Amino acid sequence: MKISFNPLYYIKPDKGRAIIMAAQLGRNTELHINETFETIIHPLHAMILSFFNGRELEDVIHDIQINIGIDESLLKHFVRDLLNCNTYLRVRCNGSFSVFPPNTLITGAYNREKMLSWRNYIYETVDLGMRRHYTPSSITLMVNNICYTQCHYCYADKRQKVSCTIPFERIKEIIQEASSLHVRTFDVIGGEFFLYDKWYELLKVLHANNFHPYLSTKLPLHETTVTKLKNAGIQDIQVSLDSLIGGHLATSLFVDESYASKIQKTILLLDKYKIPIYIHTVLSQRTGSIEDIKSIYNFIKDIPSIKEWKIDKAGKSMYANTPYEDIEIPDEGVENIAMFIDSIKDDVAFPIRAPRPKVANQLAENMKAEDFFTRGLCSGNYSSMFILPDGKVTMCEELYWIPKFIIGNIKEQSLTEIWNSQKALSLFNTKQEDIPASSLCHSCSDFLKCRSVKQVCYKEIIKQYGQDKWYLPDVNCPYTNMKSK
Ligand code: SF4
Ligand code: SF4
């Protein structure tokens, strides 16, 4: 029987422990659990799992015995527990517990791109506690904030145009360092990625280091570009498509009326070269009608390379020129779109993810204390970092150049230096006495329960209260309704 470690997962060595996480971000249509999950396992378990690369079970067990000397019956028992198990599983190991996600081991021979040798998990001490990742696991490089479109709902900080000023040689070094640190994903974004003059070279360096970034574009691509992408071996691409009604796009993206046919041609070219396409639609008042959604649906429904259609509401931005009430699509509009999607979703071969307004509102408005304290982890400065086009590194994309959240500069520091810098560590371990007394957090008796490891969402706090109010409680804090801030 051939057995594989699930190719949808990646095991990151993390000093004294290993972390199982989604192998990729943003394109996990086959992953049936939240892609932001992570489970911590004993490094010995990671060593064992690293042998499961689709070979016959007997061969794998033989190799494990030779290299790390584990008893055959114990190994068979371990495999029996994990194989095709469809729930999370806790397994004891040397006095600690490892937690495995569903289907950690599956029957069959599957390729894993980021397959580390068992030697990468050799350990001196074991620490399976919840803590900040020892090295970053996800890195995003923003190559510019220059776009082909001028979306009226834009969330990005575009107050100044910024091109990439990081020397290309330095970018190469950073990618190589990321590879040596076993960083899980190294993504690239703009603005518009394809308006970065070295996009192709960058892609080649990333691929050479086994990183397959999730590319996203709003730029109509020529056939020469699509063939270059194909030859470079890209796995897929996201195309942003809010409507195919030319007049609506003209008022929403400030493009001319030919844009709709040009972007259609791009999608057909990608399909011609069999490049899997993720369609991403942003709903705003200018392109949020049923007609807009139908225009997209009628075009993409029979295109074989469409992998997924994801529809999101335009979010509130702290940088937008347009007030959010002139951008946000009303709940009724979202409801209508959800109903339309429900009526057609079984007619297409790809999944469609559309927003559900009532559920979202209930969560935001009625978050109870127990939900708040068991909320998900924020990955910023916990497992991920974001490199701005000028080399500065911030903890989170939407915080851009706000000085409080800048943790270093890759023009002057290595990734390791930035990750372990005083700025990064003190931001992550914000002390209660450093919170101004005007904030509830300053005297909150649940400070540690709330903020150790998890952090508050600074992005949402700043969106709601302003850039200088980072120290106020999380927007979902259950205590803010009880006392005045
Ligand atoms: S939403 Fe994206 S593509 Fe549109 S202007 Fe902003 S950064 Fe550019
Ligand atoms: S956000 Fe502040 S006030 Fe609310 S629980 Fe956390 S530490 Fe306490």
Image (tube, rainbow, N blue to C red):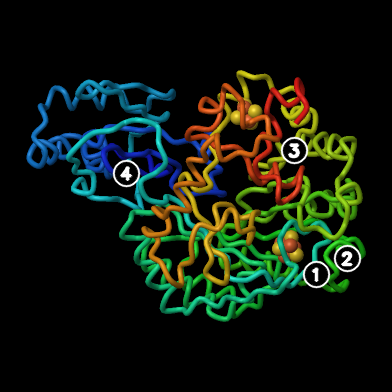
Q: Which of 232 and 24 is in front in this view?
A: 24
Q: How crowded is mark 1: few (under 14 residues within 10 Å), some or many (20 or more)?
A: some
Q: Earlier in the sequence, mark 2 or mark 4?
A: 4
Nearer to us of marks 1 and 2 is 2
Nearer to us of marks 2 and 3 is 3
Disc 1 residue type (three-letter): Ser
Quadrant where the image shows the N terminus? top left
Q: Is mark 3 within 8 Å of ligand 1?
A: no
Q: Earlier in the sequence, mark 2 or mark 3?
A: 2
Disc 2 residue type (three-letter): Gly
Q: Residue 261 carries which label?
A: 1
Disc 4 residue type (three-letter): Asp
Q: Residues within 10 Å of mark 2 (few under 14, many from 20)?
A: some
Disc 4: which residue: 14
Q: How crowded is mark 4: few (under 14 residues within 10 Å), some or many (20 or more)?
A: many
Secondary structure of the residue carrying tag 2 is helix
Question: Which percent across, then down, holds residue 375?
Answer: 58, 29
Disc 2: which residue: 246
Question: Which percent across, then down, holds residue 21?
Answer: 42, 40
Distance from the alpha carbon under mark 2 to that under mark 4: 50 Å
Q: Residue 355 carries which label?
A: 3
Secondary structure of the residue carrying tag 3 is loop
